[in-house]
Image: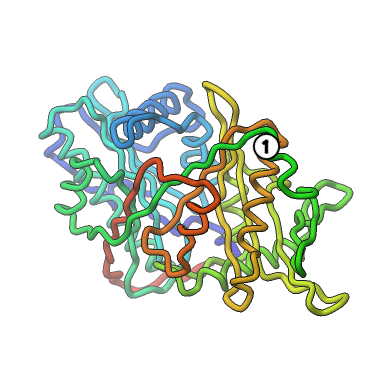
Amino acid sequence: MLPEESRFETGLVEVVGGYAELPSGWTVDTPDARDRFDVSRLTRLLRDHERHGRGWPGSGVDDVLVEVSDTGERMRANVVVRDGDEEIRAWGSVHDRAGGRMLFVHIVDRDLPDDVAKVCSDVLFHWAEGQAVAVGSARGLEVQQIDTGAFEDDARQHDWLEGAGFDRVRSWWQMKRPVTPDEATLVPSTDKWESEGVRVRLVGRGADGMPDHDDLRDVHDVLEQAFRDHFNSREETFDEFVHRLREDPGHRWDHWWLAELLDVPDAPQPVGALVATEVSSATGPNGSYVSYIGVLGDARGRGVAKSLLSTVIADAAGRGRDRVTLEVDADSPTGADGLYVGMGWETSYVTESWHRDVPVTGTPRQQG
């Protein structure tokens, strides 16, 4: 179940405090998703952050609205630092992702002088620490993890993270595979096809267009089990999982696939799942992104993952898209990167996970 109310602290004074180090006239505030100037400014900050970190921007307004709009407020909270002209110069966002894991977005204007930028960064870190205590207390935890990311070559971000007590814990290869129109026939049908005892099919849909609830449960169950032995796996409830994925701007119900073994007649066994999204592009064709692909341990070695990947490639080609992208753990215990490379994926850039464990003090106010 999702919590009835946000687990985060809504009072900025309680979380941030005074911060006299900020320049005179600068303030700490929350962004307003209904204010087009706030949304525009946050979008520009995010795109500048991406451009500096990996060489090009990819996010847009919809990606910002996922973080700051009312639809996500039960699971997210935001803070901004405004200058004397009320322009946003720094932005922090936290996401109550799963039990014990809080995601943290940390962005500071690249045009600020180093000393002012550092103060803004400290404000964001201090706020995130306070929110970690709040959400950890609400979940009844002793320790709450803050999970944030950085581009591999972003030296400024690395220095700030180290100074704030974060540890670099993992690297992730962001991989891309080109798609050509002829690959639309890579599989017999992207709706449903079978080969060597494995069936791949889209999740079922009712007359109202909504997905079959049991199929969604199977997707969630497969992914929870498949990733149980992976790095930093945290239990995420079914409601949290579906709510989070539906928030993605590229979410499409016809991008969810199940893989089933047909060993037992009339009793297909769900053993694999792939969830993809549509990635918009302002300069050319859109792409597909593999948000999740997981296969149960007992079914590995039977071509399930390759069948799922072939299906999403064919689907992208059939929709006129020119690429499929995905993320893989550089130290994946399943050796997934070998499969991806063998099927044509190449690494385009590298990101990192940085973690800090925050002790949760006080009496838990458990909810949700």
Mark 1 crowdedness (10 Å alpha carbons): few <14, some 14-19, many ≥20: many
Identify residue for label 1.
Answer: 317
Compared with residue 24, is residue 334 higher up or lower down, i.e. above or below?
Answer: below
The front one of 91 and 73 is 91
The percent coordinates of residue 340 (x first, y second) are 51, 53
The percent coordinates of residue 105 (x first, y second) are 36, 45
Compared with residue 268, is residue 33 higher up or lower down, i.e. above or below?
Answer: above
Report the number of discs: 1
Compared with residue 220, is residue 26 higher up or lower down, i.e. above or below?
Answer: above
The front one of 173 and 18 is 173
Image quadrant where one finds the N terminus: bottom right
On screen, residue 358 versus residue 180, left or right, reads left
**Which amino acid type is marked by label 1?**
Ala
Q: How is the image coloured?
A: rainbow
Q: Please give the name of the residue rendered at 25% of the width and 58% of the height, measured from the top-left corner.
A: 168
The percent coordinates of residue 104 (x first, y second) are 36, 51
Q: Quadrant of residue 203?
A: bottom right
Image quadrant where one finds the C terminus: bottom right
Q: Please give the name of the residue rendered at 41% of the width and 45% of the height, measured from the top-left corner.
A: 347
The front one of 234 and 299 is 299
The percent coordinates of residue 154 (x first, y second) are 24, 41
Q: Please give the name of the residue rendered at 58% of the width and 39% of the height, measured from the top-left corner.
A: 249
Q: Quadrant of residue 221?
A: bottom right
| Secondary structure of the residue carrying numbered label 1 | helix
